[in-house]
Image (cartoon, helix red, strand yellow):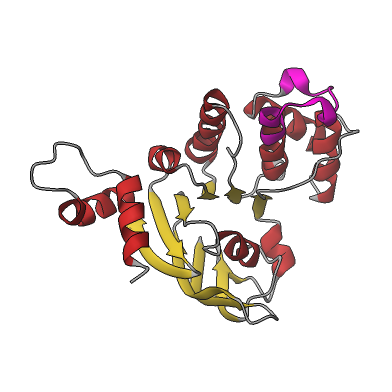
């Protein structure tokens, strides 16, 4: 689904945000992209979806080289950035219809598509309320609906549960799992909530200062680091959080 080879980004001021990053995301994955603040996660996502140009390396999505054919790639993907604006004067229904038009969803099925995604994210009863009156959780739901209204095969979610209460986090997690398990959507997600990532992702990458430190299936990483992290008399199982802190600390050396 996604193949990243030696991806780098150096800004004009000389700051190296991403350094020779290589990743592989399989079709059907819920892939967690993890790292501390300043690790280059958002920069990487923007290169993966063609918003910014890499300094070096390449990104291939479903066999298409992103820098050569961004428009065709963008038809296959959906993106929910960490910080994004909404048109507060629009209702949820109007907002989704607007984006369905932008994505060239055929007119004869556009209304049905919008109604379906509203139902998928639990916003059917709120569709005629203006977005300016939505809570943060409702905005995240309508943002995910916008991300999937054109039926992409791959979506990028940058901190989709940021600022939500525990119930809101659970609701968004369920939507993500349903999209993956029922619709077959591949998900690339960043989050600082490592417990959340452990619950919904099957594979993860851990990065720091733009460099890849570790990548693999969560179960394999837990097994790999179990003896390194766990003391002989410990009865507590190793968690993804334990692995994250161990790997990022080792990455400092």
- Main SS of the magenta part reads helix
Say whether residue 8 is magenta.
no
Query: In the image, 208: left or right of 115?
Result: left
The foreground one among 58 and 52 is: 52
Say whether residue 137 is magenta.
yes
Q: In this view, does 179 lie above or below 23?
A: above
The percent position of residue 62, horizontal first and vertical second, equals 55, 63
Residue closest to the far top? 125
In this view of the protein, can residue 15 be seen by the observer? yes
The foreground one among 184 and 29 is: 29
Residue under the point 28% across and 54% down? 221
Which of the 4 image quarters holds residue 246?
bottom left
Query: In the image, 97: left or right of 31?
Result: right
Query: In the image, 246: left or right of 88?
Result: left
The percent position of residue 78, horizontal first and vertical second, equals 66, 50
Residue under the point 81% across and 41% down? 86
In this view of the protein, can residue 108 be seen by the observer? no
């Amino acid at each position: 689904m996604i193949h990243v080879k030696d991806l780098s980004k150096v800004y004009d001021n000389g700051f190296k945000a991403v350094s020779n990053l290589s990743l592989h995301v399989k079709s059907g994955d819920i892939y967690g992209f993890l790292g501390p603040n300043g690790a280059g996660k958002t920069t990487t996502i923007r290169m993966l979806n063609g918003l910014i140009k890499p300094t070096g390396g390449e990104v291939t999505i479903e066999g298409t080289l992103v820098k050569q054919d961004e428009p065709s790639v963008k038809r296959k993907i959906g993106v929910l950035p960490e910080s994004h604006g909404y048109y507060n004067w629009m209702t949820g229904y109007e907002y989704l219809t607007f984006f369905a038009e932008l994505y060239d969803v055929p007119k004869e099925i556009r209304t049905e598509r919008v109604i379906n995604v509203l139902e998928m994210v639990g916003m059917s009863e709120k569709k005629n309320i203006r977005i300016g009156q939505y809570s943060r959780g409702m905005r995240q739901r309508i943002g995910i609906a916008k991300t999937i209204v054109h039926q992409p095969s791959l979506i990028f979610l940058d901190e989709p549960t940021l600022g939500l209460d525990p119930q809101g986090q659970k609701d968004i997690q369920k939507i993500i799992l349903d999209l993956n398990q029922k619709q077959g959507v591949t998900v690339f997600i960043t989050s600082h909530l490592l417990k959340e990532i452990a619950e919904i992702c099957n594979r993860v990458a851990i990065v720091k200062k733009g460099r890849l430190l570790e990548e693999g299936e969560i179960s394999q990483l837990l097994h790999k680091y179990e003896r390194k992290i766990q003391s002989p008399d410990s009865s507590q199982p190793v968690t993804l959080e334990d692995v994250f802190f161990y790997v990022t600390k080792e990455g400092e050396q």
